[in-house]
Image: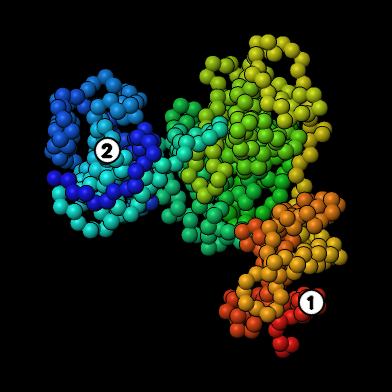
Amino acid sequence: MWTLIAASDPVLDQQRFRESLLVWVEKPHTINRRLTGVRFLAYHKLVNLDCEIEACSLVMKLDDTNVDQVLSPYRQHGDTETDVLQSVCGNCGPVLVERHLLPKQMNKFKPVHEVVLITRDCAMVSNLSKNSTLSPHHTYRIRLVQDNRIHLELLGVGTDTPAVVWLKEHVLPKIFKWANSNPVKGKQMIVPSLRLSPIERYSRVYFDLKQKHGAYLCKIWPETTDPSKFVYEDIAIASYLITLWEQDAHSSGKVSFIDVGCGNGLLVYLLSAEGYDGMGIDIRRRKIWDVYGPNVSLVEAVISPTSRFPKYTWWIGNHSDELTPWIPHLASRSRADAKVFLLPCCPFTFDGKYQRQHGGMSQYQSYLLFLQDLCQGMGFRVEFDRLRIPSTKRITLICQPGSNEAPTRRAEASRFNFVGEGANATQVPEKIDLQATSHKQVPDLDSLGGTFKPRPKVEAVRNCTQLDREFTQEVVDRIAGHLLQVEPLKDRQAWQRGGREHIGNLVRLLTDEELQRLKNQCGGLQTLLKNHRHVFRVHGGYASLNAPLSEAERKLEQVNQKRAKFKECWFFKKHPQGCPLADE
């Protein structure tokens, strides 16, 4: 007997509900944060079942050991996984999905064995690992009823256990949200996560690396950047590469790598610590390099179009910016069987910033297609994958030698001048006829070596702190004066603190020359205003005057007195009413 636990509002579309239900079946970790993923054991398209009740009774007979035996009379043989999934989306009869839910904390939990029976507009979930707390041990179902509402129902008498409350407060609202969401407009790339890496093996490697290196690296981190972001992001990237290389080693032999534009060198350190032979190269040495020890090969040097490293089988471009389009070229010129891992961030071509070329797409996605065409033209077979890292730029390109191309032709293709006349790198290369170009005298990317300009070894400070003081003071006074004229904020203060204004409107107060000077700084006007936090408060794209704090308020806000900086009070000198605080 099924007990109704909760019901949603009506959904807009029946098909969207089916698609949302399939997301919950295939990606339960999107809601259950204690899971790292799911491994599917089998898809069964069932026949010889007279009604939905008989199908439910069949599921109730299953346990952790008898699935094959119970399902044998009802299983339709000969269907592929794709056929079964199409049956789910097309509402073509009952399908039973057998899956293992994989825990994030592998030292505490074991995978959970579940079966999901999908019939018409309903999914019934049964936990065969009854003693696990990773997933509800109750048998429940989520179904669409006649009035287009989604019902969450429990087999047996309903109880308010934590698992049932979680289903009611998290699973049902999320499926309802998915079912009512609008389809993505425009041309968007949809790349599933970890499609080229076995999820179970990746999760194990990530867990082990995190336990081994995570806390230690965060503790000794000497850079000014946030260690929790960089350490765990690079651990995830290293885990992905290791699982990818474990598969590659079976067919290609020993793996070696070079990380071009390695930055802090953390990825090189992690891979070297796991026994992989490789090196990192960057134009500028980092302080943290000294922490890694002599066994980690990190080189301070300039990469040019004529650089060659034939020793290494894999080339890594991890947020390599200006070097990103050059890496596949350098790899293909170094050795014919070289492979490339690209994780692009800032879009660059061979001679400058990349300009979007694909309508209806973001610049980032357009840049990914540009790189795909570029690498394919050089003879690589390119596949996309999505990493699990805390970044919006997490789509990677895995480039391997084309299966049907001789190495000599691939090397010849890499000489093709993708930047064209005048190094016009913004033009996406056409597909190359390898036979037609193999005997032509085409320009070589190496010929750009004379005009190639690497990034300066010493990075310029572009946070508005090096601007001329008279210039910054003039801008500060002008912006503050304008804010005083804006409709006052309703804070019941007699002291005039003016109003707030969107930074986009404040930009109009500046001359073209002033704008140009600020455009060369990271963050522009917003950074300048944030640097003067004793005058301005910047939040959510808006700026207002930052009223001086009383002594009591200052003590509450000040976390570290030793690091406090003191500046002359702008309001005392320039506000029409002076500073609202007492002189002392």
The residue tagged 1 is: 576
Above or below residue 77? Residue 552 is: below
Residue 73 against residue 494 in the figure, above or below: above
Question: Does dot 2 land on a helix, a strand or a loop?
Answer: loop
Horizontal side, residue 178 vs residue 376: left or right: left
Q: Is residue 471 left or right of residue 427?
A: right
Looking at the rendered structure, the kind of residue marked 1 is: Pro
Q: Is residue 550 visible?
A: yes
The answer to which of marks 2 and 1 sits earlier in the sequence is 2
Residue nearest the viewer, comparing 14 with 286: 14
Q: Is residue 17 above or below residue 286?
A: above
Write the residue at 64% across / 37% down: 363
Q: Quadrant of residue 499?
A: bottom right
Residue positioned 63% across, 31% down in the render:
359
Would residue 92 appear left or right of 194 to someone viewing this image? left
Q: Which quadrant holds the N terminus?
A: top left
Mark 2, residue position: 146
Mark 1 neighbour density, 10 Å: few (under 14) some (14–19) many (20 or more): few
Residue at 73% x, 55% y is: 505
SS assignment at label 1? loop
